[in-house]
Image (tube, rainbow, N blue to C red):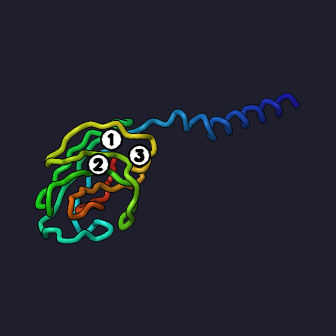
Amino acid sequence: MKKAFVTLAVLALTAALAAGGLAAVRKEGTYKLSAKLAAGREVPKPKGVPAAATGTFTGTLKGKKLTFKLTFAHLSGKAFAAHIHKGKAGVSGPILVPLCGPCKSPVSKTVTVTSVARNAIEHGATYVNVHTPKNQGGEIRGQIKATE
């Protein structure tokens, strides 16, 4: 009887650790990030964008520190802002991380992100876009790819 009780206690402790304890021990990895920005990926479709309008986003996400470089060229006007938004391809979403505003290419800096933003970036649920006066909702966009 005593042996059965000890076995049950060990099983209960193991289950408790698996359910909650290990989640607290989870290590936040380092991710390499990249995105290719183009007008054709923006939602809704921008108007009057030069065919050559493009951009790139590269970065490293380590813990809650995001170090990035954003470049863009041939836009319809000056970039007044750029952000990381939550959203799958083809879907608009809320801003998670402001990158610059006003913006001049190239933009390189380190910012702190929230746990929500980090989780979305890790799981491929974010995009970068650049906003101009002519296309205030965004002129060029690219989905962020994260690799460990």
Residue type at mark 3: give it.
Ala
Residue at 23% x, 48% y is 58
Residue 38 marker: none
Tell me how far mark 2 sits from mark 3, CA to CA: 13 Å
Residue type at mark 2: give it.
Leu
Callout 2: SS:
strand
| Label 1 crowd bin: few (<14), some (14–19), many (20+), radius 10 Å | many
Of labels 3 and 1, the one closer to you: 3
Classify the position of the N terminus by image quarter.
Answer: top right
**Residue holding disc 1:** 61
**Residue holding disc 3:** 117
| Closer to the camera in the image, 18 or 115 | 115
Left or right position of 57 against 63? left
> Looking at the picture, does residue 113 appear above or below residue 147?
above
| Label 3 crowd bin: few (<14), some (14–19), many (20+), radius 10 Å | many
Residue at 73% x, 36% y is 12
| Closer to the camera in the image, 16 or 1 | 16
Residue at 26% x, 55% y is 35
- Answer whether labels 1 and 2 touch (C-beta < 8 Å): yes
**Residue holding disc 2:** 33
Classify the position of the C terminus by image quarter.
Answer: top left
Residue at 29% x, 54% y is 128
